[in-house]
Amino acid sequence: MEKTFLMVKPDGVQRGLIGEIVNRFESKGYQLVGGKLMSISQELAEQHYGEHKERPFFGELVDFITSGPVFAMVWEGENVISTARLMMGATNPKESAPGTIRGDFAVTVGKNIIHGSDSPESAEREIGLFFKEEEMTSYEKTVNSWIN
Ligand code: DAT
Ligand code: MG
């Protein structure tokens, strides 16, 4: 089953939005298979956001993501990578639709509440960066036959 890496960023944790965000994906019908509250080291931040190394906002981005605890998660379900991106909304909250997480809870691109993998390749890479195999769980929920 497809898996993605989602993370409540430090602003979302500080604003008390972990539960709200977990609830959205749970209610949708996706399954949480790993989750932890953690601090991100400078090194992990630079690896995670490596694709943005040359961007002018890279320093700010690394400072922000290491500024407080994050809630890192692995979610599983049919088409979860692209559907989670839709549920998150556009990167810049000025453009994210109401009803999306960023559209409902964020104002500015630098503090946009949630991270989500943008492709199968980045999902695999990011899950590997944040989670050991034994930190993830595989389990059957009987309700899944009413979802898939
Ligand atoms: P996303 O988080 O939607 O995958 P991204 O990968 O393009 O977006 O960028 C990673 C993060 O970097 C994004 O969530 C917020 C920050 N960011 C992106 N563009 C920015 C910009 N123009 N100015 C400041 N921060 C930006
Ligand atoms: Mg991205």
Image (cartoon, helix red, strand yellow):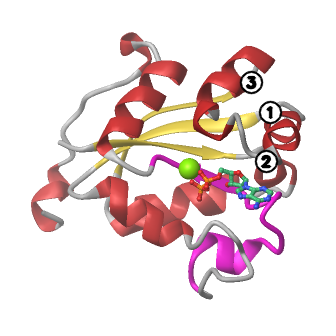
Between residues 67 and 148, which one lies in front from this camera angle?
67
Circles 2 and 1: CB atoms closer than 8 Å: yes
Q: Secondary structure at mark 1?
A: loop
Q: Earlier in the sequence, mark 2 or mark 1?
A: 2
Q: Which mark is residue 40?
A: 3
Upstream in sequence: badge 3 or badge 2: 2
Percent of width and height locating residue 54? 71, 38
| Percent x, y of residue 4 | 38, 43
* Amino acid type, callout 2: Val
Q: CA distance from mark 3 to mark 2?
A: 13 Å
> Which tag, 1 or 3, sits closer to the chain's start?
3
Q: Amino acid at mark 3?
A: Ile
Residues packed near mark 3 inside 10 Å, few (<14), some (14 to 19) or many (20 plus): many
Q: Quadrant of residue 109?
A: bottom right
Label 3's element? Answer: loop
Q: Amino acid at mark 1?
A: Pro
Q: Which residue is mark 2?
A: 13
Q: Which residues are magenta?
A: 99-117
* Left/right of residue 122 with respect to residue 51 in the rendered view: left
* Residue 106 part of the magenta segment: yes
Residue 115 at what x, y percent from top left?
A: 60, 50
- Label 2: which secondary element: helix
Q: Residue at x 46, y 63 (%)?
A: 85
Task: Establish if 133 lies above or below 126.
Answer: above
**Which one is closest to the eye, mark 3 or mark 2?**
3
16 in magenta: no
Residue 69, labelled with which disc? 1
